[in-house]
Image: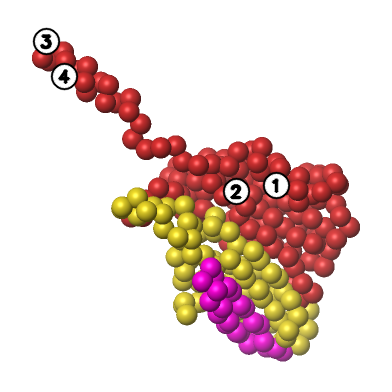
């Protein structure tokens, strides 16, 4: 489990896009670096990110080693009714982590 | 004589490269990746917007936003490529029905001064491109940890 900061508005207007910001605490080791002994450091990144709202897709992102350490992701979501925003990401070890945020539609 | 020999030896030491040249993608490789993505269609400039600074102080973390002036439902995918990185593909995003706008922001690594390219593919099959030439002062570390 890695630490994730999620920023969503407390209340949103029906059908009006709002921004979601995520900051994931992850080294995103690119697999391009070597340690002091000259041995390659294996790649260990978050390679996939999926965001859904009440089960319907918001977006899917394939991430590659060029994404900076501690990835920051920001995107727009639109909601018609109050519900749950689910964000799932998978890293190279196959670890899947899911975070949720409740969205209240005014 | 001894002093002169010392100069010769120390001078020859200067031309020995300190580090091997880093592996980098080439614009041709990136063009091939984009051609693969676009397929038979033609690629046009415009509509997609890549927002990234042209002067980058630290290549380890560069904020960028890619966006498109079309409804999110009309977008099949957006890809970003960095020509000068060892691995040029940066990200691919696809949008679903709950996306508020076809926009995605993140922070990326840049290995050197280079051209960064965003390619958007729309549902009607048309492809759009935006590119930014930028200068990187401190490159993202590709050699050693620490």
Query: For the residues marked 1 and 2, what is the alpha-carbon distance in whole angstroms?
Result: 9 Å
Residue that label 2 marks: B88
Query: For the residues marked 1 and 3, what is the alpha-carbon distance in whole angstroms?
Result: 59 Å
Badge 2 and badge 4 in a common chain: yes
Badge 4 and badge 1 in a common chain: yes
Left or right for B19, reference B127: left
Report in which chain the residue with disc 1 lies. B
Q: Colour of chain A?
A: yellow
Q: Residue B76 at what x, y percent from top left?
A: 79, 62
Residue that label 4 marks: B6
Residue that label 1 marks: B33
Badge 3 and badge 4 in a common chain: yes
Q: Nearer the viewer, residue B83 or B135?
A: B83
Q: Is residue A84 magenta?
A: yes
Quadrant in which residue B107 is drawn: bottom right
Q: Does label 3 or label 4 sit earlier along the sequence?
A: 3
Residue at 43% across, 45% down: B138
Q: Is residue A25 magenta?
A: no
Q: Does label 1 or label 3 sit earlier along the sequence?
A: 3
Q: Regarding mark 3 in the picture, which secondary structure is present there?
A: loop
Q: Does label 1 or label 2 sit earlier along the sequence?
A: 1
- Is any atom of residue B7 visible in this view? yes
Report in which chain the residue with disc 2 lies. B
Residue at 52% across, 65% down: A45
Q: Nearer the viewer, residue A93 or B76?
A: A93
Q: Which residues are magenta?
A: A82-104
Query: For the residues marked 3 and 4, what is the alpha-carbon distance in whole angstroms?
Result: 9 Å
Q: Regarding mark 1 in the picture, which secondary structure is present there?
A: helix
Q: Does label 4 or label 1 sit earlier along the sequence?
A: 4
Q: Nearer the viewer, residue A50 or B71?
A: A50
The chain in red: B
Of the numbered discs in the image, which one, if any, rests on residue B1?
3
């Amino acid at each position: 489990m890695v630490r994730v900061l999620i920023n969503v508005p407390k209340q949103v207007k029906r059908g009006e896009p709002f921004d979601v910001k995520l900051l994931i605490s992850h080294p995103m080791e690119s697999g391009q670096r070597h340690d002091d002994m000259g041995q390659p450091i294996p790649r260990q990144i978050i390679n996939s990110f999926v965001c859904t709202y009440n089960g319907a897709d918001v977006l899917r992102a394939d991430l590659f080693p060029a994404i900076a350490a501690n990835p920051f992701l920001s995107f727009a979501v639109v909601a018609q009714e109050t519900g749950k925003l689910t964000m799932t990401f998978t890293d190279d070890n196959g670890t899947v982590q899911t975070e949720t945020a409740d969205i209240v539609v005014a | 004589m001894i002093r002169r020999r010392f100069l010769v030896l120390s001078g020859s030491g200067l031309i020995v490269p300190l580090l091997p040249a880093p592996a980098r993608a080439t614009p041709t490789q990136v063009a091939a990746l984009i051609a693969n993505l676009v397929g038979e269609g033609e690629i046009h400039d415009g509509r997609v917007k890549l927002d990234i600074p042209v002067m980058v102080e630290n290549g380890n973390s560069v904020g960028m936003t890619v966006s498109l002036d079309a409804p999110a439902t009309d977008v099949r995918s957006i890809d970003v490529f960095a020509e000068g990185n060892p691995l040029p593909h940066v990200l691919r995003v696809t949008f679903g029905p709950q996306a508020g706008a076809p926009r995605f922001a993140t922070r990326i690594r840049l290995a050197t001064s280079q051209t960064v390219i965003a390619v958007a593919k729309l549902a009607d099959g048309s492809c759009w491109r935006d590119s930014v030439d930028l200068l990187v002062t401190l490159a993202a570390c590709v050699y050693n940890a620490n």
